[in-house]
Amino acid sequence: MCLAVPGKVIFVQGEDPLLRYARVSFAGVIKNVSLTCAPEAKIGDYVLVHVGVAISIVDQKDAEETYEYLRQMGELDGLEPAGQGAPGP
C-alpha cells in the first residue's frame, strides 16, 4: 500500500514552480521534499508527502489526525526518531 504522510514545511527554496523544494518536518525528522505538485506551499503549511513529493496542502488538524492514525498502524517507519512514538507532525 502506498501512503501520503503529513508533515510541516519549515523551509522553502526556489522560485521556479518546477524546481522548488522544502524541508519538511515529520515529528522532528527532517526530509527534503519536492514542491512541484504543491508550488503554493509556504513555511508553516502542512503538506501530504508521497515518495518525496508534496502532493497537497492540508490543514493542521487533518495533518495531526492522519499522522496519529498512521502511527497507530505502524506505517511511519523511518519517520519517527528512534525509540520514540512522536506525537503529531
Image (cartoon, helix red, strand yellow):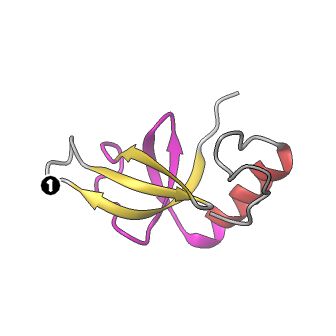
Measuring from the top left, give residue 85's x and y in whole percent: 79, 57
Is the residue 40 above or below the residue 83 in the image?
A: below
Which stretch is magenta? 35-62
* Amino acid tagged 1: Glu
Q: Is 60 a magenta residue?
A: yes
Measuring from the top left, give residue 34's x and y in whole percent: 35, 43
Residue lying furthest left in this view? 16
User: Which of the 4 image quadrants contains residue 3?
Assistant: top right
Q: Nearer the viewer, residue 22 or 60?
A: 22
| Residue under the image location 60 percent in, 48 percent down | 5
Q: Quadrant of the C terminus?
A: bottom right
| Residue under the image location 72 percent in, 63 percent down | 65
Q: Is residue 50 left or right of residue 64?
A: left
Residue lying furthest right in this view? 72
Q: Quadrant of the N terminus?
A: top right
User: Which of the 4 image quadrants contains residue 88?
Assistant: bottom right
Residue at image mark 1: 15
Residue lying furthest front in this view? 82
How many numbered callouts? 1
In the structure shown, which secondary structural element does the residue marked by tag 1 occupy?
loop
Q: Is 1 a magenta residue?
A: no
Is the residue 85 above or below the residue 21 in the image?
A: below
| Residue under the image location 70 percent in, 57 percent down | 66
Is the residue 69 above or below the residue 51 in the image?
A: below
| Residue under the image location 85 percent in, 51 percent down | 72
Q: Nearer the viewer, residue 10 or 4?
A: 10
Measuring from the top left, give residue 6's x and y in whole percent: 58, 54
Q: Is residue 32 left or right of residue 6?
A: left
Q: Is residue 76 left or right of residue 5?
A: right
Q: Nearer the viewer, residue 78 or 38?
A: 78
Q: Residues within 10 Å of mark 1 (few under 14, many from 20)?
A: few
